[in-house]
Image: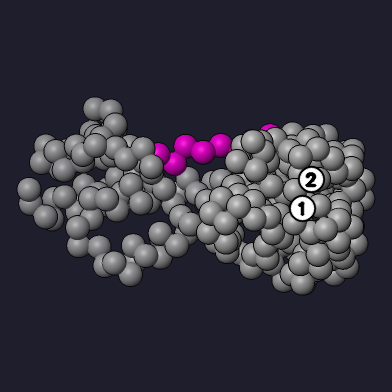
Amino acid sequence: MNRFSRRRAMTIIAAGGAGAALNSLTGDEVKARGLTTEEQAATAMPAARAFSGQHSPKPLPFDPAKLKGISEKLIKSHWENNYSGAVKALNAVEQRLAAMLGEKDLPPYIYGDVKREELARTGSVVLHENYFANLGGDGKAGGKVLDLIKQWFGSYEQWEAEFKKTANALGGGSGWTILSYNLHTGEVHNYWAWDHMHNAPLGYPLLVLDMYEHAYHMDYGAAAAKYVDAFMQNVNWDEVNRRVEATRAGK
Ligand SMILES: [Fe+2]
């Protein structure tokens, strides 16, 4: 295989945004992109499912007009711009990684930049989906998670104070506050996360709070603590208990 031909083929494909399906071009697509027979052969490698770039946004699991203290306008903007934007970006990153699979001369530091984006965008998508899914409730904790909270924090009140303190420490900046069950230690903690990639290893998210300014600035300006109070009134503890059941803490 001629290196030049291979590189040209990959460049043509990547420019066409079809990096997720290197070996799935139709005859017409191949013709339209002007690939020679040799260049067509260069694209005939197995597709990597990991880089399929086919994620799609999950709809809001609650009526955004019915939250207490968080406006419909803010929730819709958050879902459409930040969350859906992260989904689109993750797809683009995966497609770029697929195209890079065949670029043997690619400098590792360039590849590293895209791998960093893969981690960041995946974190954003997963955390936003958990965040929206744990909203829309009545804010009244109960069930197994309440037992766990009492076991690890002494009382609900003491846990909530620590959760809020952790969240407010991120006010004016960015990040996530995550009540987690740690699959390794078996412990329950409120973890502080500076960005989408910041998480205690094997921390399984039970309750996720978005502390990026886009999650509250439209309603509360810089008053992050008021947003944290409003969030607590809307927690869907049934969803949190479903997550507990998915871990051995729920057994
Ligand atoms: Fe967000």
Q: Tags 2 and 1 in contact by the CB under 8 Å rule?
A: yes
> Quick check: can you spot residue 144?
yes
Element at badge 1? helix
**Residue reaching furthest to the left:** 1
Please indicate whether residue 139 sits to the left or right of residue 86 in the image: right
Residue 225 x/y as whole percent? 87, 65
Describe the colour scheme in one phrase. one colour
Q: Name the residue at 56% across, 50% down.
A: 183
Name the amino acid type tagged 2.
Asp
| Mark 2 to mark 1 CA distance (whole Å) | 6 Å
Query: Quarter-wise, where is residue 7 in the image?
Result: bottom left
Please indicate whether residue 12 sits to the left or right of residue 68 in the image: left
Say which residue label 2 marks.
147
Up-down: is 201 above or below 98? Answer: below
> Quick check: can you spot residue 217?
no
Please indicate whether residue 75 sits to the left or right of residue 198 in the image: right
- Span colored in magenta: 52-59
Residue 113 x/y as whole percent? 40, 65
Query: Quarter-wise, where is residue 110 in the image?
Result: bottom left
Closer to the camera, 151 or 218?
Answer: 151
Location of the C terminus (image quadrant): top right
Closer to the camera, 144 or 191?
Answer: 144
Name the amino acid type tagged 1.
Gln
Q: Name the residue at 76% across, 67% down.
A: 166
Mark 1, other Cα within 10 Å: few <14 / some 14–19 / many ≥20 = few
Element at badge 2? helix
Q: Is residue 224 magenta?
A: no
Say which residue label 1 marks.
151
Closer to the camera, 125 or 89?
Answer: 125
Q: Which mark is residue 73?
A: none
